[in-house]
Image (cartoon, rainbow, N blue to C red):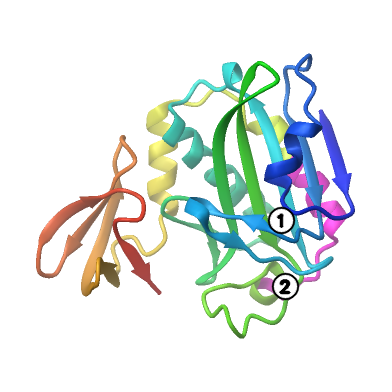
Amino acid sequence: MRLFYLKECSSTHDVIEKFISQDILELQGVYTFNQTKGKGQYGNSWDSGHNLSLAYSVAVPNELVKLPNHLFNFHTAELLADFLAILTNQTPEIKWPNDIIINNKKVSGILIEKKVIKGRTYFLIGIGLNVLEENFKNLPKAGSLLTQTGIRFDLENVTQSLHDYFVEHLLKPISESSVLGRLNQRLFRKDLISVFEIGQLRQNGIIKNVDEDGYLWVELENNGLQKFFHKEITLLY
Protein backbone atom coordinates (compact mmCIF):
# COMPACT_ATOMS: atom_id res chain seq x y z
CA MET A 1 0.00 0.00 0.00
CA ARG A 2 1.81 3.09 -1.29
CA LEU A 3 0.43 6.61 -0.83
CA PHE A 4 2.44 9.69 -1.75
CA TYR A 5 1.74 13.26 -0.65
CA LEU A 6 2.37 16.18 -3.01
CA LYS A 7 2.46 19.71 -1.62
CA GLU A 8 1.14 20.98 -4.96
CA CYS A 9 0.54 19.60 -8.43
CA SER A 10 -1.38 20.40 -11.60
CA SER A 11 -3.43 17.18 -11.46
CA THR A 12 -2.85 14.02 -9.45
CA HIS A 13 -4.29 12.15 -12.41
CA ASP A 14 -1.51 13.41 -14.65
CA VAL A 15 1.41 12.86 -12.27
CA ILE A 16 0.56 9.53 -10.67
CA GLU A 17 2.42 7.49 -13.28
CA LYS A 18 5.69 9.01 -12.06
CA PHE A 19 5.14 7.31 -8.70
CA ILE A 20 4.01 3.88 -9.89
CA SER A 21 6.30 0.92 -9.37
CA GLN A 22 5.50 -1.76 -11.96
CA ASP A 23 6.92 -4.40 -9.60
CA ILE A 24 4.10 -3.87 -7.09
CA LEU A 25 0.78 -5.58 -7.72
CA GLU A 26 -1.39 -3.48 -5.41
CA LEU A 27 -3.10 -0.10 -5.17
CA GLN A 28 -0.75 2.86 -5.38
CA GLY A 29 -1.97 6.40 -4.72
CA VAL A 30 -1.01 10.07 -4.69
CA TYR A 31 -2.82 13.04 -3.17
CA THR A 32 -2.61 16.76 -2.68
CA PHE A 33 -4.58 19.52 -1.02
CA ASN A 34 -3.44 22.04 -3.62
CA GLN A 35 -4.33 20.92 -7.14
CA THR A 36 -4.09 23.67 -9.73
CA LYS A 37 -5.54 22.05 -12.87
CA GLY A 38 -7.83 19.23 -11.81
CA LYS A 39 -9.42 16.98 -14.42
CA GLY A 40 -13.05 15.90 -14.39
CA GLN A 41 -15.15 13.52 -16.44
CA TYR A 42 -15.26 14.14 -20.22
CA GLY A 43 -12.82 17.02 -20.24
CA ASN A 44 -14.45 18.98 -17.44
CA SER A 45 -12.31 20.62 -14.80
CA TRP A 46 -12.42 20.08 -11.06
CA ASP A 47 -11.81 23.33 -9.19
CA SER A 48 -10.27 22.99 -5.76
CA GLY A 49 -9.18 25.46 -3.13
CA HIS A 50 -5.81 25.47 -1.40
CA ASN A 51 -5.93 23.25 1.72
CA LEU A 52 -9.72 23.01 1.44
CA SER A 53 -10.24 19.92 -0.68
CA LEU A 54 -8.70 16.57 -1.51
CA ALA A 55 -7.40 15.54 -4.92
CA TYR A 56 -6.62 11.83 -4.82
CA SER A 57 -5.64 9.40 -7.56
CA VAL A 58 -5.06 5.68 -7.23
CA ALA A 59 -3.65 3.23 -9.78
CA VAL A 60 -5.21 -0.24 -9.86
CA PRO A 61 -3.53 -3.00 -11.91
CA ASN A 62 -5.95 -4.17 -14.57
CA GLU A 63 -5.42 -7.86 -13.82
CA LEU A 64 -6.82 -7.36 -10.32
CA VAL A 65 -10.14 -5.98 -11.60
CA LYS A 66 -12.79 -8.63 -12.29
CA LEU A 67 -15.64 -6.34 -13.36
CA PRO A 68 -16.45 -4.84 -16.79
CA ASN A 69 -15.14 -1.29 -17.13
CA HIS A 70 -18.45 0.51 -16.63
CA LEU A 71 -19.39 -1.62 -13.62
CA PHE A 72 -15.98 -1.02 -12.05
CA ASN A 73 -16.72 2.68 -12.48
CA PHE A 74 -20.06 2.27 -10.67
CA HIS A 75 -18.47 0.07 -7.99
CA THR A 76 -15.90 2.78 -7.27
CA ALA A 77 -18.65 5.38 -6.88
CA GLU A 78 -20.56 3.04 -4.56
CA LEU A 79 -17.54 2.53 -2.33
CA LEU A 80 -16.89 6.27 -2.16
CA ALA A 81 -20.54 6.80 -1.21
CA ASP A 82 -20.26 4.06 1.43
CA PHE A 83 -17.12 5.65 2.86
CA LEU A 84 -18.75 9.10 3.02
CA ALA A 85 -21.86 7.63 4.64
CA ILE A 86 -19.72 6.19 7.43
CA LEU A 87 -17.69 9.39 7.73
CA THR A 88 -20.59 11.85 7.77
CA ASN A 89 -23.56 9.82 9.02
CA GLN A 90 -25.44 11.13 5.99
CA THR A 91 -26.95 9.24 3.02
CA PRO A 92 -24.89 10.05 -0.08
CA GLU A 93 -26.48 9.43 -3.46
CA ILE A 94 -24.91 8.75 -6.84
CA LYS A 95 -25.80 11.06 -9.71
CA TRP A 96 -25.36 8.90 -12.79
CA PRO A 97 -22.78 7.99 -13.76
CA ASN A 98 -20.53 8.76 -10.78
CA ASP A 99 -20.97 12.11 -9.02
CA ILE A 100 -21.54 11.94 -5.27
CA ILE A 101 -24.40 14.01 -3.89
CA ILE A 102 -25.05 14.83 -0.24
CA ASN A 103 -28.26 16.72 0.57
CA ASN A 104 -28.74 17.73 -3.08
CA LYS A 105 -25.23 19.14 -3.58
CA LYS A 106 -22.31 17.58 -5.45
CA VAL A 107 -19.41 17.05 -3.05
CA SER A 108 -17.28 14.70 -5.13
CA GLY A 109 -16.56 13.66 -8.69
CA ILE A 110 -14.72 10.67 -10.10
CA LEU A 111 -12.66 10.26 -13.27
CA ILE A 112 -11.56 6.76 -14.31
CA GLU A 113 -9.23 6.08 -17.21
CA LYS A 114 -7.45 2.98 -18.45
CA LYS A 115 -3.80 3.46 -19.35
CA VAL A 116 -0.65 1.45 -20.04
CA ILE A 117 2.15 2.63 -17.75
CA LYS A 118 5.61 1.07 -17.71
CA GLY A 119 4.34 -1.98 -19.55
CA ARG A 120 1.35 -2.72 -17.30
CA THR A 121 -2.29 -1.69 -17.79
CA TYR A 122 -3.89 0.24 -14.94
CA PHE A 123 -7.21 1.74 -14.06
CA LEU A 124 -6.45 5.28 -12.89
CA ILE A 125 -9.12 6.48 -10.47
CA GLY A 126 -9.15 10.22 -9.81
CA ILE A 127 -11.31 11.60 -7.01
CA GLY A 128 -11.97 15.22 -6.19
CA LEU A 129 -13.60 15.70 -2.79
CA ASN A 130 -14.74 19.06 -1.45
CA VAL A 131 -14.05 19.00 2.28
CA LEU A 132 -13.74 22.47 3.83
CA GLU A 133 -14.92 24.90 1.12
CA GLU A 134 -17.68 27.28 2.12
CA ASN A 135 -18.01 29.63 -0.86
CA PHE A 136 -19.86 28.16 -3.83
CA LYS A 137 -21.30 31.43 -5.11
CA ASN A 138 -20.51 30.56 -8.74
CA LEU A 139 -21.23 26.83 -8.38
CA PRO A 140 -24.85 26.53 -7.19
CA LYS A 141 -24.92 22.73 -7.57
CA ALA A 142 -21.75 22.18 -5.52
CA GLY A 143 -21.18 21.74 -1.82
CA SER A 144 -18.58 20.38 0.57
CA LEU A 145 -18.57 18.05 3.53
CA LEU A 146 -18.52 21.18 5.68
CA THR A 147 -21.51 22.89 4.04
CA GLN A 148 -23.55 19.69 3.87
CA THR A 149 -22.83 18.36 7.36
CA GLY A 150 -21.59 21.33 9.40
CA ILE A 151 -18.50 19.30 10.39
CA ARG A 152 -14.91 20.44 9.87
CA PHE A 153 -13.07 17.28 8.92
CA ASP A 154 -9.28 16.96 9.05
CA LEU A 155 -7.93 16.61 5.50
CA GLU A 156 -5.13 14.22 6.41
CA ASN A 157 -7.42 11.93 8.37
CA VAL A 158 -10.01 11.87 5.58
CA THR A 159 -7.34 11.02 3.01
CA GLN A 160 -5.73 8.20 4.95
CA SER A 161 -9.10 6.75 5.89
CA LEU A 162 -10.31 6.88 2.28
CA HIS A 163 -7.15 5.20 0.98
CA ASP A 164 -7.38 2.51 3.64
CA TYR A 165 -11.05 1.93 2.79
CA PHE A 166 -10.29 1.53 -0.91
CA VAL A 167 -7.38 -0.82 -0.21
CA GLU A 168 -9.65 -2.97 1.94
CA HIS A 169 -12.78 -2.99 -0.22
CA LEU A 170 -12.11 -2.03 -3.87
CA LEU A 171 -10.90 -5.43 -5.06
CA LYS A 172 -13.11 -7.67 -2.92
CA PRO A 173 -15.14 -10.08 -5.09
CA ILE A 174 -18.59 -8.74 -5.92
CA SER A 175 -21.12 -9.89 -8.50
CA GLU A 176 -22.15 -7.71 -11.42
CA SER A 177 -25.78 -7.91 -10.28
CA SER A 178 -24.82 -6.65 -6.82
CA VAL A 179 -22.98 -3.64 -8.28
CA LEU A 180 -25.99 -2.78 -10.43
CA GLY A 181 -28.43 -3.28 -7.57
CA ARG A 182 -26.43 -1.09 -5.20
CA LEU A 183 -26.18 1.65 -7.82
CA ASN A 184 -29.91 1.70 -8.41
CA GLN A 185 -30.56 1.85 -4.67
CA ARG A 186 -28.38 4.98 -4.36
CA LEU A 187 -29.44 6.62 -7.63
CA PHE A 188 -29.99 10.38 -7.26
CA ARG A 189 -33.52 11.57 -8.17
CA LYS A 190 -34.71 8.03 -8.94
CA ASP A 191 -38.51 7.80 -9.30
CA LEU A 192 -38.88 11.57 -8.85
CA ILE A 193 -40.12 14.08 -11.44
CA SER A 194 -37.07 16.00 -12.67
CA VAL A 195 -36.16 18.36 -15.49
CA PHE A 196 -33.79 17.11 -18.17
CA GLU A 197 -31.97 18.78 -21.04
CA ILE A 198 -31.62 16.71 -24.21
CA GLY A 199 -29.78 18.61 -26.91
CA GLN A 200 -31.29 22.08 -26.71
CA LEU A 201 -34.68 20.93 -25.43
CA ARG A 202 -35.93 20.60 -21.87
CA GLN A 203 -38.67 18.32 -20.64
CA ASN A 204 -39.84 16.62 -17.49
CA GLY A 205 -39.00 13.01 -16.84
CA ILE A 206 -38.50 10.35 -14.19
CA ILE A 207 -35.30 8.34 -13.76
CA LYS A 208 -36.23 4.66 -13.65
CA ASN A 209 -32.95 2.75 -13.45
CA VAL A 210 -29.48 2.07 -14.86
CA ASP A 211 -29.19 -1.16 -16.87
CA GLU A 212 -26.41 -3.77 -17.08
CA ASP A 213 -24.78 -1.93 -20.00
CA GLY A 214 -24.56 1.34 -18.06
CA TYR A 215 -27.43 3.15 -19.81
CA LEU A 216 -29.75 5.44 -17.88
CA TRP A 217 -33.46 4.81 -18.48
CA VAL A 218 -35.74 7.83 -18.17
CA GLU A 219 -39.52 8.03 -18.61
CA LEU A 220 -39.91 11.30 -20.51
CA GLU A 221 -43.06 13.37 -20.47
CA ASN A 222 -43.22 13.69 -24.26
CA ASN A 223 -41.19 10.75 -25.56
CA GLY A 224 -41.89 7.88 -23.20
CA LEU A 225 -39.25 5.49 -21.85
CA GLN A 226 -35.83 6.18 -23.38
CA LYS A 227 -32.27 5.10 -22.64
CA PHE A 228 -29.26 7.41 -22.64
CA PHE A 229 -25.50 7.12 -22.52
CA HIS A 230 -23.10 9.60 -20.91
CA LYS A 231 -23.51 13.18 -22.09
CA GLU A 232 -26.66 12.43 -24.09
CA ILE A 233 -28.88 13.82 -21.34
CA THR A 234 -28.36 16.34 -18.52
CA LEU A 235 -30.22 16.27 -15.24
CA LEU A 236 -31.04 19.79 -14.07
CA TYR A 237 -31.29 20.07 -10.29
Question: Which of the two labelled residues, at mark 1 and mark 2, occupies the earlier sequence position?
Answer: 1
Q: Position of residue 110 (x, y in %)?
A: 57, 50
Q: Does the magenta stretch include residue 154?
A: yes
Q: What residue type is labelled 2?
A: Leu
Magenta segment main secondary structure: helix
Q: Where is residue 167 in the image (x, y as percent from the top left)?
A: 72, 32
Q: Nearer the viewer, residue 125 or 104?
A: 125
In the shown orientation, is residue 213 left or right of residue 24?
left
Q: Nearer the viewer, residue 118 or 32?
A: 118
In the shown orientation, is residue 101 left or right of residue 86?
left
Residue at point 50%, 33% (across, down): 72
Q: Residue 146 carries which label?
A: 2
Provide the residue designation for mark 1: 87
Q: What residue type is labelled 1?
A: Leu
Label 2 Cα neighbours within 10 Å, binned few <14 / some 14-19 / many ≥20: some
Q: Give the distance between the C-alpha atoms of the residues marked 1 and 2, in whole angstroms.
A: 12 Å
Q: Is residue 158 magenta?
A: yes
Q: Are the residues tagged 1 and 2 within 8 Å (C-beta)?
A: no
Q: In this view, does 46 lie above or below 57?
A: below
Residue at point 83%, 31% (across, down): 2
In the shown orientation, is residue 177 left or right of residue 159?
left
Q: Is mark 1 on a helix, strand or loop?
A: helix
Q: Let me know if residue 129 appears in the view.
A: yes
Q: Is residue 24 above or below residue 189?
A: above
Residue 115, picture quadrant: top right
Residue at point 50%, 39% (across, down): 73
Q: Position of residue 108 (x, y in %)?
A: 60, 59
Label 1 Cα neighbours within 10 Å, binned few <14 / some 14-19 / many ≥20: some
Q: Quadrant of the C terminus?
A: bottom left
Which stretch is magenta?
A: 149-164
Q: Residue placed farthest to the bottom in the image?
A: 137
Q: Which mark is residue 104?
A: none
